[in-house]
Amino acid sequence: MQVQITKNPSLDPDPFVTGFLPLLCGRVQQKFDQLAIESFGFSAFTLMENAGRGAALAIENIYGAMCGRKVVICCGSGNNGGDGYVAARTLYNHGASVCVMVLKPSSTPEANQNWHVLQKLNELDQSHRLKIEGYTGQSLPPADLYVDALFGVGLNRPLQGDVLDLADALNTMNAPVVALDLPSGLHADTGTPLGSAVQADLTITFSAYKPGLLFGQGPKYSGRIELAHIGIPLSAILREPSLPIHWLTTDSAISYCMPDRDLQAHKYTAGMVLVIGGSPGFSGAPMLTARAAARVGAGYVACAVPESIQSILATAMTEIPAIGLPESPEGGIATDAAMSVLQPWLAKANALVIGPGLGRHPNTQDFVQSILRSSELPVVVDADALPAAAGLLTSARKRNWIFTPHSGEFNRMAPEFGKFDPLDAACQWSSKWNCTLVLKGHPTVIGRSQDSAFVCGTGNPALATAGTGDVLAGLCGGLLAQGCARSTAAICASHIGGLAADQYSLKNHSGTMIAGDMIDGIVTALTSLRKK
């Protein structure tokens, strides 16, 4: 008998049971480790042992057995250096020739204990495969692999002195460089190099992903990222209310959250989306949005555009009806006449997407505000509708809205954030206005509450092309129409769009993708998610 997991996309996803991965800021990771020790009786020495061993096993899993190969491990004075000592001992036990470069004496009891263990092992070494040296500015010896165990998540100041020299030396090596937990010199939360930073080919991060690996210049400095669990019971500790936790999307989590189509469904019960957009010269944007909404599973999609471009859409889209909206003589959409035309369509729709290619004529902006004031539908607010919608937020009415700005649009919409941190801005803004915010970028961030955001685990530079934002808006609208809660729709839509781009880039140069390719890729992306 097959066990069926109950899921309800009309509710916000519970990340503890759906397969999302925790994303911990530096201070939260440190608190996390402390709680593991205090609440579960782990010793700091045990956690260091598990981290170092996990790193060594990950290295061999990716680069092959280290037996007979030369490894140089650069160790700082803190716990990151202690992880390096454990990794050195483990690789030595696996047959590697290991040279440990020690920057400074250990500053924590656990790191100091592991340094003494390594020293004792060095004294007993008859094979001359283990060497321990203090770093005094000398050149690094040639090796098959280098390990950066200088600094972890606790660093908040620029590298300087010998550690800066050592980091710069690692960046000149002609062999792979592996960073433990975080490349030394990279800020754990923002991905900003603190002056200089180690450029790793592989980063083995412990327990949970850190934002700095994904944001800013983090991907450039981190290289490939592997997660090594070190024995801490995540599900128990992550429910600690004092830990503000963000989450990274995964294929399995999105597969769990996606709606299923009922066996007795017809085109209206499968969800109807009304797309409102377009303007002279910008007829393509609403077409992309409408096609994406249909591809993600909405049973019926209609597209309302200004009358002057209706014939263009009617010719180009055979499956999707094009509705003509009256225009005013001075330009833009005529609000009263357009509202009259739309009433029967709004009565049938389950979700509304407004903004793609709509233009910012004052009459059109008035129309946007009029429809948003009057409609009780779930709404995706995109592109040219963002300014008008933002002007309505101060009213007390509760709204079921998703906003989808890129960073420039967000700056114009919420100038009070200035030069913003994406995670913090998404949390603060969405909590303040009780709306879901999809802050498009690499990676995309979905704000849900004061202390929790979701980060899209898919996507690549192929998305840096015109029209992909229109596709994302359509994905959000299609999922809303099928009954998804607004945050569920936003999270799933972002992941699916990114996955379509990832799968395209596996077969093609990422710079060749256009928005139409992304829509075509939705089919493959959804099919692969169904198999999870």
Image: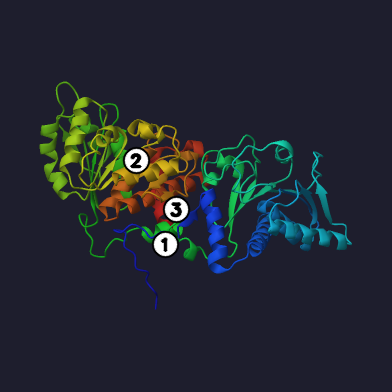
From where the camera sits, is residue 125 visible? no
Q: Amino acid at mark 2?
A: Thr
Q: Which-is-in-front pick, marks 3 and 1?
A: 3
* Image: 8 above or below 139: below
Residue at 17 percent of width and 38 percent of height = 371
Q: Quadrant of residue 375?
A: top left
Mark 1 packing: few (<14 Cα in 10 Å), some, or many (20+)?
some
Label 1 residue SS: helix
From the viewer's perspective, is 178 left or right of 441?
Answer: right
Residue at 82 percent of width and 49 percent of height = 133
Q: 374 or 317, which is in the foreground?
A: 374
**Res. 134 mark:** none
According to the image, label 2 marks what residue?
404
Q: Quadrant of residue 381?
A: top left
According to the image, label 1 marks what residue?
18
Q: Amino acid at mark 3?
A: Pro
Considering every residue shown, the one lying at the far right of the view is 126
Rendering coords of residue 269 (x, y %): 21, 57
Q: Quadrant of residue 518?
A: top left
Circle count: 3
According to the image, label 3 marks what residue?
244
Residue at 32 percent of width and 44 percent of height = 432
Label 2 residue SS: loop
Q: Amino acid at mark 1?
A: Thr
Label 3 residue SS: loop
From the viewer's perspective, is 340 left or right of 7?
Answer: left
Mark 2 packing: few (<14 Cα in 10 Å), some, or many (20+)?
many
